[in-house]
Amino acid sequence: MKTNPNSARLRRAALSAACALLLHSASALASDAAPPTTLDTVRVVDTRSGALSSTASTGSALGLSVLQTPASLTVISREQLEQRGDSNLNDAITRAGAISALPHPGNGLSALSSRGFTDGASVMRLYDGLRQYGGVGITFPFDTWSIERIEVLRGPASVIHGDGAIGGVVNIVPKKPSRGAIENQVSVTLGSEDTARLGFGSGGALTPALAYRVDVSGNYSSGWVDRGHNGDATFSGALLWQPRADLQFTLTHAQGYQKPMRYFGTPLIDGRQLDALRHENYNVADSVIRFRDRWTQLDALWTPNESVEWRTRVYQIDSQRDWRNAEAYVYNERTGLIDRSGNTQITHNQDQTGLTSTLRLLGNAGGLPNSFAVGFDANRAHFKHTNNTYAGSSGPVDPFNPVPGGFVSDAPNLPRYRNSAEQVALFVEDRLELSERWSVLAGVRHDRATIDRNDLVSGQRAFSKTYSSTGWRAGTVFAIQPSMTLYAQYSQAADPVSGLLMISPANGVFDLAKGKQIEIGMKQAFDGGEWTLAAYRIRKTGLLSRDPLQPDRRVQVGAQASKGIEASLNWAFAPQWSLDANATVLKAEFEDFLEATGTPAVIVSRDGNVPPNVAERLANVWLSWQFLPDWSVASGVRYVGKRYADNANTLQLPGYTTTDLALTWQAAPRTRVTARMFNVFDKAYYATAYYTSTQWLLGADRRVEFTFDHRF
């Protein structure tokens, strides 16, 4: 069925107009209201500066501070991003505790692991609080230049953000328009591996009622493997208009373009990785990886008085992703060559139009202070998948001197299927202050999604199914001291068995997987710092397992569990010295999980095994010292423990430690020069295994960068 090429624009315009009309009508009822601001957070603790006192929307819809939220929540500030020099978003995210990255081209270089659960179906990524629904792999944002902060919530988060967040949620919050004087910033970086990076940002008030923000950035590098050239560009712009004291609109548009390294890893040779192959690339010379994304939203905020806040958003997301590569490499013991197969050509066309609205009220319930939020979320998404059935081979290559050749496939590259999803959700959250020290919080969210799959080859409807889930959380926070809280929570959530917009007819018969978590923790802010401690247990049921009586039949009876302890410390322990550290110890394992292996298929139990790509030990340390008034030095250490590449736990990716250094000179009040060295000891490490468990992707080499920053 043909679609109107202007339909996406018409939907955007209609939704934007409806939102504006609705809010204008509502605001007319409160034209004499008191001058508003965003609702002040109700605090039962002191308001000292620091991450614990900051408000993070990822953990609650009630505008709570991190200290008041009964969950494990980390906020990475803009100041920390600039100090650490992480231009790649994954590098920045994994500085937070209990989270690691497993990027490869197939998942858009975006997949994460949190609390023993991995990938986009269990660890959700948001951009400014919005999710791209139902796909696998999020390709925007990817650069940190336009980012104001990163919020990392660990553990099930369905009560706020819907299904697909049993492991946690990462929310990337962009820079916003400010009402102050116009200020500009430029950053230029040059470094090894032909690194070149440019960033420009500008923002401020144009008139008393109008403010703006614009950020542009671009990156280029030759990469750390042969033929590893890569580049990207990002634009982010926002315009804030406040026609009245109680009403404001913000129109935001962001887009990104990426051509990542066309690199799919290195195969095992006789069961091990060879150092001599560290920089080899076995892809074809005319390979392609290209991601293009656009996010547009209109945000309306109405605050008629200090007790009411109503925020509504309409948005449009469009993504196009292209791959054409030789992706599978296996060492042939007989020939001594690497056989290449799986010549894959794919295009993803994904679009999403949505509306989300949240009303927040401050008041009393039974004479006690109470915060209440109710919201609605709806979106419609489409996903078209074009491929060549992953058929073709460009021939074998010498492991030590590969001649790349060209892409070869006799299979036609045709549109294969188109999935659409209509999703709606209602959520409610409430916080009651039983005393100045003790509060209780509860929330519930119900999601309903209808998925339709059309086979574009046969022209037939493949299947249609409606999924529904209800996630909820109950928690309590007790202030032992004004700046020290003890919390506990119980939560339930749901995950799809795969991305719903990519779900196959075979997987379409299965329901959502279910997860439960119990968590307790402590948080404290003190003079010069703050610390947190959390302990949890999560159990997820409904994984796809094998029927022991029929090995070729899958059944939804598998389970996976994890339990662990997380700790963090931020401490200015001496004049001009500061320490930021976190550590995680967890145990993750399959339960009641069977897998078919071999030919003919044999059913094997994986009970007690660690799920692939899960590191059970993680740690980060960042130490900085201002040794002269205008000079400072800092060092960061990142530790990722061993992981397994397969369910059998026979292939082990070794743990690794990398060290970074930074020397900064504040040359003038508005000018800063920084020299950085990443992976100082040039540690060879493996970021993840590809879809084939014997094909591992190496992480970045040692590199040196020099950055010039200036504000004007």
Image: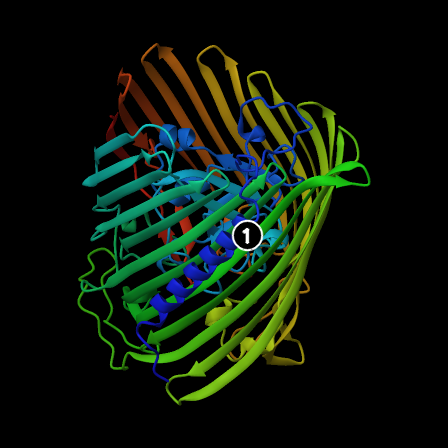
| Label tally | 1
Tell me the element at label 1: helix
> x%, y% of residue 212?
33, 40
* Nearest the eye: 404 or 298: 298
Point out the residue furthest to the front here: 32
Relative to 536, residue 50 above or below: above
> What is the three-letter code of the residue carrying label 1?
Ala
Q: Is 476 left or right of 637, judged from the image as shown?
A: right
Specify the quadrant that holds the C terminus: top left
Specify the quadrant of the image occupied by residue 49.
top right
> x%, y% of residue 59?
59, 43
* Nearest the eye: 89 or 284: 89
> x%, y% of residue 309?
58, 44
Specify the quadrant of the image occupied by residue 441.
top right
Relative to 622, residue 698 above or below: below
- Is residue 165 something one can see in this rendering? yes
Specify the quadrant that holds the N terminus: bottom left
Specify the quadrant of the image occupied by residue 146.
top left
Q: Is 635 left or right of 603, judged from the image as shown?
A: left
Q: Residue at x 71, y 39 (%)?
A: 363
Q: Is 482 left or right of 662, judged from the image as shown?
A: right
Residue labelled with disc 1: 26
Local crowd size for mark 1, using a 10 Å CA cut-off: few (<14), some (14–19), many (≥20): some
Q: Residue at x 38, y 57 (%)?
A: 108
- Is residue 102 something one can see in this rendering? no
Q: Residue at x 29, y 56 (%)?
A: 263
> x%, y% of residue 294?
34, 57
Relative to 249, residue 568 above or below: above
